[in-house]
Amino acid sequence: MLVVDEWLHERAPAGQVADTLGRVRPSPVHGVARSTGVSERQIRRRCREAFGYGPAVLARMLRLQRTLHLARSRQRPSRLADLAVAAGYFDQQHLAHEVRAIAGTTPSALLAVVPSDPYKTRRAAPRAQMIGEEVS
């Protein structure tokens, strides 16, 4: 049982960090350190061990993940700018900058994989393809 307790003690802060950083407005690392009782250095080290990158990058990844989740949900905002704000970005340009930095594409291209495509990001097929004619 002691081994399990030690394992949980080692892993629990990483989970708490992910939960805290996954919020719309995440706490800074020193706030997470204070709430978990672990030093900032330990938070950074454990984050890198558990997730492969530090808390700042983890927060960015979680925010992008939240954006994709919101875009696929039934309660999705009607405009891309509203989606950006709901996911925790300051505005649509902030979302665009983050998507380009993390995914190397535009928000429209990234959201094009969303089945219902509420933001009209898919390009229309040429007329000939829509009616089943051969395109030469």
Image: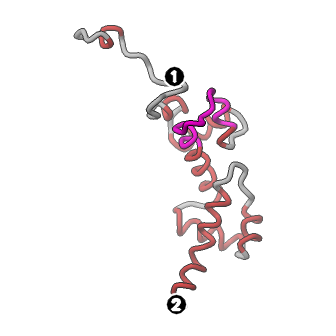
The percent coordinates of residue 87 (x first, y second) are: 65, 42
What residue did someone put label 1 on?
120
Does residue 90 show up magenta in the picture?
Answer: no
Q: Residue furthest bottom?
A: 2
Residue 121 visible in the shown view = yes
Residue reaching furthest to the front: 74
Principal secondary structure, stretch drawn in magenta: helix
For mark 2, give the secondary structure.
Answer: loop
Residue 4, x across and y down, in percent = 52, 84
Helix, strand or loop under label 1: loop
User: Marks 1 and 2: which is nearer the front?
Assistant: 2
Disc 1 from disc 2: Cα separation: 54 Å
Quarter of the C terminus within the rendering: top left
User: Hey, which quadrant is residue 45 in on the image?
Assistant: bottom right
Q: Is residue 127 left or right of residue 105?
A: left
User: Which stretch appears magenta?
Assistant: 67-85
Q: Is residue 101 left or right of residue 88?
A: left
Tag 1: Cα neighbours inside 10 Å, few (<14), some, or many (≥20)? few
> Does the magenta segment cover residue 79?
yes
Of the residues shown, which amino acid type is indicated by label 2? Met
Q: Is residue 3 above or below residue 63?
A: below
Q: Position of residue 118 (x, y in %)?
A: 53, 27
Residue at the image point whose x is 63% and y is 27% from the top? 79
Q: Residue at x 55, y 36 (%)?
A: 74
Whether residue 136 is visible here, answered yes or no, is: no
Residue at 55 percent across and 47 percent down: it is: 65
Question: Which of the 4 image quarters holds residue 13?
Answer: bottom right
**Front position in the image: 5 or 47:** 5
Q: Which mark is residue 1?
A: 2
User: Could you tell me which residue is drawn at 58 percent across and 45 percent down?
Assistant: 64
Which label sits on residue 103? none
